Amino acid sequence: MTATATFDVRRPWPDLWGWYVVLAALLAPVLVPPGPGRTAWLDPLNLIALGAFAGSIALSRRNVQVPFAGPVILMSLGSLVATANAANAGAAILTLLQDAYLYVWFVMLVAVLRERGDLRALRVAWVFTGSVVAVIGLVGVARHGGDSIGAILNPKGFRAMGTFDQPDELADYLAMSVFIAISLTGRVTRLFAALAIALMLAAMAATKANGGLISLAGGLVAWSIVRAWAAGVTPAGWIGASLVGASAAVVAIWLVLGLGVGGSEIGKIETGSFLGRMSHSSEGREKIWQALLKRYRKSPLGIGPGNSRWQTVTIEERERPIAGHLDTYDSGADPFLSKEAHNDYFAYLVERGPLALAGMLMMRWQAFRRILGAGRSRAISGGLTAALFGAWVASCLNANTIETLHFRHVWLFLAMVCALDSAADREPAPRPHRRAALAVAGRTS
């Protein structure tokens, strides 16, 4: 369900909204130092823009497109019901306010972006910012002794954070940025795109974030499939490529497991790189989820938005070490409090209940439909469609390891998708060739 209406954005001179969009792309990943309530540098600018946007709507009395209206209503209803069970009512209210702020900002972005073609300026600003953030992350690792490839891959080394406060958040942003860079193929120089992608991949490795790297791999697979589909690859070609890939995988597995080829080397790589963190991370998340599920059974409608980390845990459930002298109760570093769910799907179920989870899943599915729907028109190219699809697959996969819907860059990406889909809806049908039109006229006369 999506409420749509025409909103005609008139561009003044100078194009202030265009500059705002570029600034939003530049500031979206800058989360340190955080402000009160985890506000960021972008938020004061957004408040000014939202005020100007509301004023223009009130004066012109124009309607605005409201994407994902149905899913957001379900998510909001589930969240409001679950708030009654919140152990920390303040955290629940703050979470709801953050949700409302991000969604209103998203709606404004869609209205501003929908008249701006394929959003090349926004994508270039995004990739430029992603490159700078990647460099900041790599410099941070180098300052902590990570000045070699081995140090970057070491599971116990310093993890890159860039302008974020967590390595997993940086990995999520960089994974999406890689696909934005891919979408610019043919629109920017090859050197710029290649350098940006190389920097972002290196910084992703430096985050040592298993979820981010796995999501990037899954997104690249999805990107290649949609890219080939857009290029008109036949079903026979798909079958042949799948058989070749499956055969190569079977041979590789047989060589390693059956004959032991490279077994010791693979073992060294696994234990001596950040891949060795995967089993430990999985065990930690299982403990968090088991503890939260115990509390969810008592409150099947949800324990309250943002309340995962405010649940008191027993000694055997404790995941944190004893809090340091810089840690406070308000920071969530108390060792007898639960950690966040580290999973968007699980968090929505436990914190907000099944109704909100259904709405969130519906919203993610509608985003996929919008991307593919826009790709069927002349509004966006096949390369851009594939890149957006791959980016959203990566984000949905990474939602299994971190709560991605809290991130500003995710809502900026969704605004791009909805703006391009709106452009596709307004795309006029192609005019028939003159000879074809004459032939049709002759048959009807």
Image (cartoon, rainbow, N blue to C red):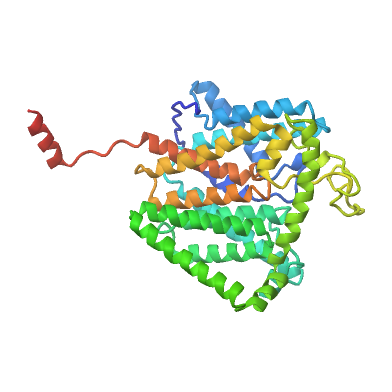
In this view of the protein, can residue 390 be seen by the observer? yes
Q: Quarter of the image holding residue 411?
A: top right
Looking at the picture, tell me which residue is in the foreground, 13 or 51: 51
Is residue 327 rendered to the left or right of residue 188?
right
Is 421 rendered above or below residue 163? above
Give how far across and how far down residue 156 sits, in percent. 77, 67
Is 161 rendered above or below residue 45? below
Residue at 68% x, 61% y is 207
Looking at the picture, tell me which residue is in the foreground, 237 or 166: 237
Residue at 71% x, 26% y is 80
Residue at 26% x, 39% y is 430
Give how far across and how far down residue 81 sits, in percent. 72, 25
Q: Quarter of the image holding residue 269?
A: bottom right
Q: Quadrant of the C terminus?
A: top left
Give how far across and how far down residue 390 sits, in percent. 50, 52
Give how far across and how far down residue 325 sits, in percent. 92, 53
Numbered marks: total:
0
**Residue placed furthest toward the front:** 258
Is 110 rendered above or below residue 180? above
In this view of the protein, can residue 14 be seen by the observer? no
Looking at the picture, tell me which residue is in the foreground, 300 or 327: 300
Residue at 8% x, 32% y is 443
